[in-house]
Amino acid sequence: MIRIRWFTPLLVAPLVGGLALAATAPAPKAVATPKLAKPPTPGALAEPAAATQTGLPEILVKAVTPTDLRASKDVIELGKKLFFDARVSADGTVSCASCHDPDKGFTDHNQTAVGIRNQVGQRNSPTVLNALFNETQFWDGRAASLELQARLPILNPIEMGQKSEKDVVAALDRLPEYHESFMRLFGRPLNYDDLARAIAAYELTQVALDSPFDHFLLGEEKAIDAAAKRGWTLFNGKGRCMSCHGVNLTQPLGTDNKFHNIGVAAHKQNFVALAREALATVSRGTAEEIDRLALETRFSELGRFLVTKQQKDVGAFKTPGLRNVLVTHPYFHDGSSATLWDVMDHYNKGGVQNAFLDGGITRLGLTENEIDDLVMFMASLTSSRYKDLGQKELARQRQLSRTHRPDRDNTAALGKSPGFTGPLGDVPPNPTKIAKDPARIGGR
Ligand code: HEC
Ligand code: HEC
């Protein structure tokens, strides 16, 4: 891998601190502003799911579910009500479900999320399905648990827009239905901690496994078709996907729970200048401050770096699990890929080169048929809960992919162009042609 030395000064840049958040200009948006939709009402897909599903080791559920939240049906019901209640937002227009709609795989299918007063954020809404298994929450892992996560969107000015925890508590405790429920279930007046607890209790019920692939792993040969089987082989071999998205019986979700720069953010940023600026701007680094920087400013693209301030995390985002990925489009932290075919094109050409690109990302040389197979494998990770939506979605994406492949770059994918010369400088250098034994590259 080519290493570029100019990032060294980043490390020694002093932490000046103090600049107000307002001073950072919002990032320009290229796409037409989507409109905030009416908050959805809960349908069948919003129901708590079975805690035991094919493909799900029970021990895993126990490991991730805090004991005090596991049992109570009433708390879960309360959490569900809050999740769908737009009165949690400052002006009664946005609920959690506005951006995490069960009928859309607990996402919103927008490129990036739209919140209160039609404000558009910098990041794509990830799914709440199986979020209980995430070691950290958010694309940059800035929240350690579902409970800590739920506290932030309510107070974020461009999501649900409440001014303070106190305001939220006062607004909801005023409603007899909530006042009584909280008194009955928690034995004390409504407070912000219990509010987050109840919402998290509901989210903990959103397990969505039991996919055709789970049945295949457990020995049902015919549960997935030949294309998906070839895709599974490519996933673990030529595609190199399993080094970050490994799927197996004990780690069924398809994520290493780590953070990598795979070159998505490099599309629009001069990382080094941006990171330096961020170091000078991020003052306290509280959860609320990072939340605002991540959702409202161009520093968003720095990813995990905003949380750790470590050079290795520049442009790094959490490896998302691949369960139900078919129904949670568009893809990546910025929603920049519309279909799974676009995602494959991104990987096939080796991502977008930048000094912080993960070493595991290199051009793959996959053929069109191989790309189709990998997509079919990913489609086989769709839970039985989402079977119908999945089928429709696969047909839609396939159709779209026939006319719309903005990231396809066969020359780069096959290694036929020299390094760093594409329009985005996005082609990795070719390996030496004389090394017959790859283990000897690097001169042993
Ligand atoms: C305006 C849209 C919007 C609203 C409203 C909203 N979210 Fe989100 N949610 C997002 C976005 C965008 C992210 C990713 C932000 C990031 O990573 O920086 C996210 C992240 C999450 C995650 C982390 C998932 C993961 O894989 O890391 C969970 C869980 C979640 N939201 C639950 C909730 C809950 C609970 C509420 C209500 C209290 C809520 N959201 C309200 C847009 C929204
Ligand atoms: C070096 C680790 C790494 C490798 C290898 C890797 N991925 Fe990823 N994957 C990630 C990360 C990190 C993201 C999120 C990146 C972002 O949004 O900036 C991601 C995002 C995705 C997404 C989007 C999911 C969503 O919910 O938006 C899909 C689909 C995906 N990867 C599939 C694959 C496939 C298929 C392969 C193999 C061809 C692969 N990945 C190889 C780390 C990796």
Image (cartoon, rainbow, N blue to C red):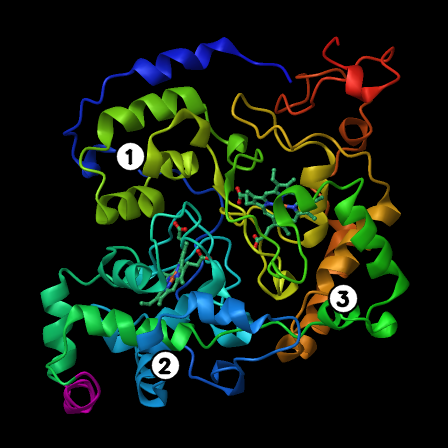
Q: Main secondary structure of the magenta part?
A: helix
Residue at (78% x, 60% y) in the render: 376
Which mark sits nearer the N-terminus, 1 or 2?
A: 1
* Residues rendered magenta in the picture: 175-186
Please state the horizontal and vertical placement of residue 107, each as a whole percent of the image: 49, 65
Q: Give the foreground label among 1 and 2.
A: 2
Q: CA distance from mark 1 to mark 2?
A: 36 Å
Q: Which residue in the protein does label 2 denote?
A: 80
Label 3: which secondary element:
helix
Label 2: which secondary element:
helix
Amino acid of disc 3: Leu
In this view, the residue in front, 207 or 171, is 207
Which mark sits nearer the N-terminus, 3 or 2?
A: 2
Q: Which residue in the protein does label 3 denote?
A: 217
Q: Quadrant of residue 105?
A: bottom right
The magenta stretch spans residue 183: yes
81 up-or-down from 211: above or below: below
Please state the horizontal and vertical placement of residue 153, each as a whole percent of the image: 29, 60
